[in-house]
Each structure stands twice: as C-alpha cells, then as structure tokens.
Image (spheres, rainbow, N blue to C red):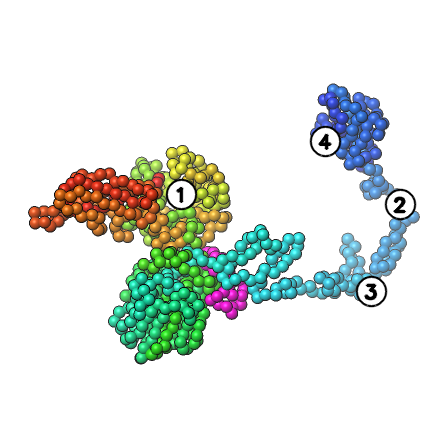
C-alpha cells in the first residue's frame, strides 16, 4: 500500500493507492489488496491503471456507486497488476487553521456576521452585552442570563411548560395506576402499562405470551412453607371427628398435632367440625364451660424444624370464628428449657389478640426468639373469655418465614404430605400480594414472603442432621472411602487416620455440622444420582455452604465431577468451572461458586470440597446446597422438611433401630418371624421407600428354645437360610429356611446399599 499526500504539509487532500495482482478470471475487484488495504473510494474521483495503463471510466471499467468495487468488461489475466488511486474529497472547509496565514476579510467569508439574542452582529465588531449578562472566562461563556433576555424562557416537558431555572419534579405516572397494588411494567418500545393485581396469594412469573411478559401464578402452595402441621384441621386420626372432653389434670389431644393444656375448669370440649364458619373444609371447635376457663390451644414444633425459625422474622396467621366477642385471648410462644423439653419453659412472646364476634382473619408478625433452637410451642391462650357454650372455630393456621401472611398452604404441600407429617439478613423469598385471603383489607402493596422449597436443594442431608449409621459416633477413615453422615462420604488419601463425626453446629450457626479431623487429605462429597441431576444438566447452578476451622490458614477448595457411565465413577470428568478456593478461619466462612453442569453430565454428578488437614486440626461443615441459578439462597432441605429428608436418606440406607441408636448385632428391635418346631420358615419385608438397590442384610437368631420351652439369649445365627430375593417391582425381600429348630428371627440392616 502506498499513501501519497498532495500537498503533504497541510493534509488538504490524500490519495490511497490500492494495489492488486490478479490470479486470473476476476471480473470484479473489491475488498483487500496485496497489503490488506480495503478498497474504498468516492465514485467519480478514482483512477484505475491496468499494468501501468490508465483506463477510461465507464468504458474500460465501471465503478460501483458506493465506492467499494469496480467491474471490468472482461476477465483479468493471470498476474495482471491493477492500481486504483482513491482520492479524498477536496474542500476548503477541511483546511487546517494552522495552514491559514494573513488577514481574511469579512467579505471573503460566506457568513460575515453572527446572531446573538436575535441581533445580527458583524464579525470584527464589538458586542454590546445585554442588561444582566456578562461575558467572562477564556471560553467566552455567557453567565447570569435572565429568562426575559431569551427568546424562549421555558421548555415543554410532557405537554407542560417548565420555566427555565425552575425545578422539574419527576413523579410516577399515577394515572396509569388505577388499581391498588398495581405494578408499572414495560411493554417494549419505551412504553409502560399497569400489571393489575393477581388473585389472592399469587406471584408474578415470566410469561412470554403476555404483552408485559409477566403474569400471575399460584397461589403459593409449597411443601415446607408452613411450619405448623395440619393447620387446616384435616387429619384427626385419634378422634375422627368425635368430641374430646378436656380435664384439669392432663393435656387433651385434639386433631393431629394440636392439643389443649392448662385447662382450669372441667368439661371444656373440642371437636373437628365442618368449616362452614371459617370458609374451609374443616375447623377445630373449642367450646367453653361454666367458670373461668384459662387454657392454651397450641402445637409444639420439633427442635429439628424450629431451628430454622430462630432469630428470623416470622408471621402466624389463621381464620378464627367466635360465637361472641372475646377480649381476653392472647397469642403466645413458649420455649422449652432444653431440647424438646418443656418441664421449665419460658414465655418470651405474649400479645393480646382482638377477636370480634363472627369471622376474624388474624395475623401477627414477630421475631422468633433465638431460644427456638430447642423447639417452640405456638398457640392461643384463652384467659377468661370462653364461658359456658361460647365457642371458637379455628382453621388455616400457618407459621411462615417473612413479614407477609400468604395464602394458606399445607406443611406437607398436599393432603397426603400433611397426613404423613402429622404422626432480615440472609433472607430470601418470593414477592406476593399482601391483599390476600388472610388479610383482604390490607394495603395491597407487594411484600416478601418466605419459602422453604422441597427439591430446591439437589444435595440430600445438606444440614448434616441425619446420621442413621453412627448416631453421632466418630467414623475413622484411613486411606479409603467411607460413608459418614447419611449421603456424605469422606475419601482420605493420607496414610494416617482421619475421622468424620456429626457434632453440634455451634461453630457454623446451625443445629448440626460434620466435623472432619486430620490427619486428612481428600474429599468430603456427595454423589447425586443420574435421575435426580437430570433437570440441572446444561443449567447454571450454585454450590454453597458454611465452613469453620479450628485454626486459621486452612485452605479448602470446591469441586464437581460427573460420572462416565450411569452412577459409575470409575471414569469421570472434572467440571473445571466448579473449582473455587476458600480461606477458612476460626469464624464461620460462607462460600458459594456458580458454574454450569454440562449437558453430558446425565450419568450423575459428585459435588464436594477438598482439603488437607494436619493432625488434630478440624473443620466443621454445614448448610451445603446445590441449586439452580446464580444466587446462593437460604439453605433448604432437599425434602422440604425433616421427615421428607429422612425418607430421602432411607432410599440409600435404613436402619431397623430407633433414631439416635446405631445399628448393632446384639440388639434388634422387633421379631420379624417366629418359627415353630418342625416347620420351615419363610418371611418377607416391605420397605417404606424404594431402595436404590438391594441392601445387604443379616438374619440373626438372638434366641433359641431351651428345655423348658422358653427362649434364651443366643448368639447363634440361623443355621440354614436362603439368600434373600429382591423384588424390585414391589420393593420387598423374601427369604426362607429349612431349619426345624424353634427360634425367633430378627432382621439386622448390617450393611447398606449406598452408591459411592
């Protein structure tokens, strides 16, 4: 490429020479030349040379009107050399001021005057400043010009004249918001409209079929949102709708999970009735008797569930119908003295409730005391108001995280779920309409309500609560992979022993934590089954948790891998974007890492942490969560609540021993089958949840008949027993023996069906 300037001293005009050597057969030339210079010229101002010969425009070649190509009447030959001189426009306006010398007269200029304030002023003449104006500064800036000195003393904004120098107030276009609680949303093209309020308790969701791209969905009815079981009084396994008479000596158990206590007069009755008065299917009716009836109607929340409420803003709500006005009722919270132990309770919350005659929609927002980590009793105290034949009907009782009483939802998410369950900083939630069924006359302003969503967390037992195998005992790991707490394994590549143990989560601010103590070098992780991880493949996820170190300077890293074949990690692939380094100290460290689970990860994913710990050094780990999205939200159990989480763990391992008791050969609860003398023995067992695969089991005979016919303790195993048959279709096992000795057979879950 050659650039020539004419003249070169003042840059008045430039010429770019485009040079191209033909390969043969070209009719049209465009794009880049031999020196990567793009062809661009002003049509009519170019010159084209072919092998040094100047060509005639529109005869020997035709230039494109846009100046980006030329076309020849016939094809070029091999090695033809084309030069195109591209001249820029020549204009006096482009002459640099530094190149102009001497004096230029006004008459020589096209404009010999300028206009200031509607006055024509000849160039070179003096300017007479207007009254109240001044010219100052090196840039000749006009300052302090009054509106009256300007031809236009105002501007128009949205059709309204605004005086210059005045104040402009930008306000919400109230004319759009014709409905209480309406939301202004964009419709595209710079326009907005009102999204009218949805039905009670519904939430806004993305909806591409709508002009606003938003519509209302719901209402919220998610498992775990309501911390009170059987809040709509459906389940009444004890009484099945029969009348219960309370006494002064003991609590009276009503519909499932609710009871009456501190009854000071006899003959107070309670019954599940049709919810005609409350607008629900069922209600709990409490009827007073003659005398001063001081009583509590309440439910106790297990510590395992109440722990999540401690220190948080919560709202209790209900529908209550009263046959007459009651002025002496109070809402209360009672805290136990120790873990689920109410022998010496405290009453930190006690507030009056105004109950009118007829239907009342009651809600109360408060901070759950920190002592709720040991459990909480929530209910209503009727101090003196339930006189003879005075009754109240109560239904749709709900306790939820957040400051808004949302539409009632069963704690289990569905009727079957509730039947099964019947036997602020860091807050996350959903935006709901406060003009809900529980508060129909509220402001209507959208507010935040809490959620505790079943299935949000892909990691089971992320709160480190469930420890069926070890019941809190330490598990030693030495150069091997070992299951510790349910669903979590520890792999130690060090030659010396390390331990993992469920401990109190004092250091992590949770109820429980997993403590890993060195010498240790390896992983603490969980493997997510292929069927479970399927919805997350190809999606953005966030892995988060809390870690505490017994000493500062501990380095922990997150990782994720996926299996080569279904649930088989003999060959695996690392998800490099899941790696994140965490510096752990003697205060709880929150961590989170966001990454994409590859679409190929359909065979299962392993997620966890990796670290190296010196002898006696430990870390406490809890609140482990893997969820869709880019935000580490509040920890939620994978099952939504503790009973469902326990069932999720039992798919991989289940013990026949009570919770908190580790499996052991010398103790097995319950006789599975008693075999009489001279008869073959067979039996079966149906599992409460489908197992991942056939579990390993031991049939144990702790008793053998002695001469007197009584069963005496024996450590002898059953002599002859067939290998159990695993019936996957109906999820049960069967077995048989041919022994003829009288004996009782016990069943031990002595090993597990865990996938590693």
Residue picked out by circle 3 = 131
Tag of residue 128:
none
Residue 467 in sight: no
Q: CA distance from mark 2 to mark 3?
A: 33 Å
> For the image shown, how many numbered marks are present on the structure?
4
Relative image position of residue 178 (x, y in whole percent): 61, 65
The residue singled out by tag 1 in the image is: 528
Q: Which residues are magenta?
A: 424-450
Please state which of the two labelled residues, at mark 2 or mark 4, is closer to the viewer: 4
Most extreme residue toward the left is 707
Q: CA distance from mark 2 to mark 4?
A: 46 Å
Q: Secondary structure at mark 4?
A: loop
Which residue is more in the foreground, 639 or 173? 639
Q: Is residue 116 left or right of residue 341?
A: right
Q: In terms of secondary structure, where does tag 3 sit?
A: loop
Residue 31: assigned label: 4
Q: CA distance from mark 4 to mark 1?
A: 55 Å
Residue density around tag 2, few if under 14, some if 14–19, many if 20 or more, within 10 Å: few
């Amino acid at each position: 490429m050659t650039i020539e300037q004419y003249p070169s001293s003042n840059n008045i005009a430039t010429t770019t020479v485009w040079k191209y050597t033909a390969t043969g057969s070209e009719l049209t030339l465009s794009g880049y030349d031999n020196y990567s210079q793009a062809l661009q010229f002003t049509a009519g101002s170019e010159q084209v040379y072919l092998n040094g010969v100047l060509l005639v425009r529109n005869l020997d070649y035709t230039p494109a009107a846009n100046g980006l190509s030329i076309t020849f009447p016939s094809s070029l030959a091999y090695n033809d050399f084309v030069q195109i001189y591209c001249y820029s426009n020549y204009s006096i306006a482009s002459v640099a001021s530094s190149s102009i010398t001497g004096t230029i007269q006004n008459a020589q200029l096209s404009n010999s005057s300028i206009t200031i304030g509607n006055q024509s002023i000849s160039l070179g003449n003096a300017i007479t400043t207007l009254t109240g104006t001044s010219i100052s500064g090196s840039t000749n800036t006009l300052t302090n010009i009054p509106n009256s000195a300007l031809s236009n003393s105002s501007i128009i904004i949205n059709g309204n004249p605004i005086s210059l120098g005045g104040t402009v107030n930008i306000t919400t276009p109230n004319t759009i918001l014709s409905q209480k609680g309406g939301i202004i949303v964009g419709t595209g093209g710079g326009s907005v409209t009102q999204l009218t309020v949805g039905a009670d308790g519904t939430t806004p969701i993305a909806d591409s079929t709508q002009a606003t791209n938003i519509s209302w969905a719901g209402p919220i009815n998610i498992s775990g949102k309501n911390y009170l079981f059987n809040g709509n009084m459906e389940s009444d396994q004890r009484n099945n709708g029969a009348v219960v008479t309370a006494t002064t000596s003991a609590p009276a158990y009503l519909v499932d999970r609710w009871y009456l206590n501190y009854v000071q007069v006899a003959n107070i009755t309670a019954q599940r009735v049709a919810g005609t008065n409350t607008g629900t299917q069922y209600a709990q009716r409490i009827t007073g008797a003659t005398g001063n009836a001081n009583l509590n109607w309440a439910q106790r929340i297990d510590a395992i569930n109440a722990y999540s409420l401690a220190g948080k803003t919560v709202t209790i709500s209900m529908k209550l119908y009263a046959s007459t006005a009651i002025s002496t009722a109070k809402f209360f919270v009672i805290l136990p003295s120790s873990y689920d132990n109410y022998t010496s309770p405290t009453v930190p919350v006690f507030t009056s409730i105004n109950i009118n005659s007829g239907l009342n929609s009651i809600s109360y927002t408060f901070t759950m005391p920190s002592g709720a980590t040991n459990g909480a009793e929530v209910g209503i105290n009727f101090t003196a108001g339930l006189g003879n034949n005075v009754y109240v009907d109560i239904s749709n009782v709900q306790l939820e995280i957040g400051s808004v009483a949302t539409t009632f939802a069963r704690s289990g998410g569905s009727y079957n779920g509730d039947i099964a369950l019947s036997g602020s900083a860091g807050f996350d939630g959903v935006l709901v309409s406060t003009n809900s069924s529980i508060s129909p006359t509220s402001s209507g302003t959208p507010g935040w309500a809490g959620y505790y969503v079943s299935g949000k967390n892909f990691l089971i037992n992320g709160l480190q609560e469930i420890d069926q195998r070890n019941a809190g005992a330490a598990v030693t790991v030495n150069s091997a992979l070992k299951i510790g707490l349910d669903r979590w394994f520890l792999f130690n590549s060090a030659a010396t022993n390390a331990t993992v143990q469920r401990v109190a989560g004092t250091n992590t601010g949770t109820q429980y934590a997993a403590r890993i103590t060195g010498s240790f070098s390896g992983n603490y992780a969980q493997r997510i089954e292929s069927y479970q991880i399927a919805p997350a493949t190809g999606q953005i996820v966030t892995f988060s948790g809390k870690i505490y170190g017994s000493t500062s300077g501990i380095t922990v890293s997150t990782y994720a891998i996926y299996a080569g074949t279904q649930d088989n990690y003999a060959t695996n692939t690392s998800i490099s974007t899941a790696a994140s380094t965490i510096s752990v100290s003697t205060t709880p460290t929150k961590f989170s890492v966001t990454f994409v689970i590859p679409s190929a990860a359909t065979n299962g994913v392993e997620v966890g942490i990796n670290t190296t710990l010196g002898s006696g050094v430990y870390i406490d780990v809890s609140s482990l969560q893997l969820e869709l999205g880019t935000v580490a939200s509040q920890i939620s159990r994978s099952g939504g609540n503790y009973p469902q989480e326990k069932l999720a763990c039992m798919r991989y391992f289940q013990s026949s021993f009570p919770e908190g008791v580790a499996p052991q050969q010398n103790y097995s609860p319950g006789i599975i089958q008693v075999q009489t003398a001279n008869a073959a023995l067979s039996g079966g067992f149906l599992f409460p949840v489908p197992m991942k695969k056939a579990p390993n089991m031991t049939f144990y005979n702790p008793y053998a008949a002695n001469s007197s016919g009584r069963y005496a303790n024996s450590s002898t195993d059953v002599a002859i027993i067939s290998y159990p048959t695993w019936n996957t279709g109906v999820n049960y096992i069967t077995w048989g023996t041919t022994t003829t000795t009288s004996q009782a057979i016990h069943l031990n879950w002595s090993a597990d069906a865990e996938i590693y």
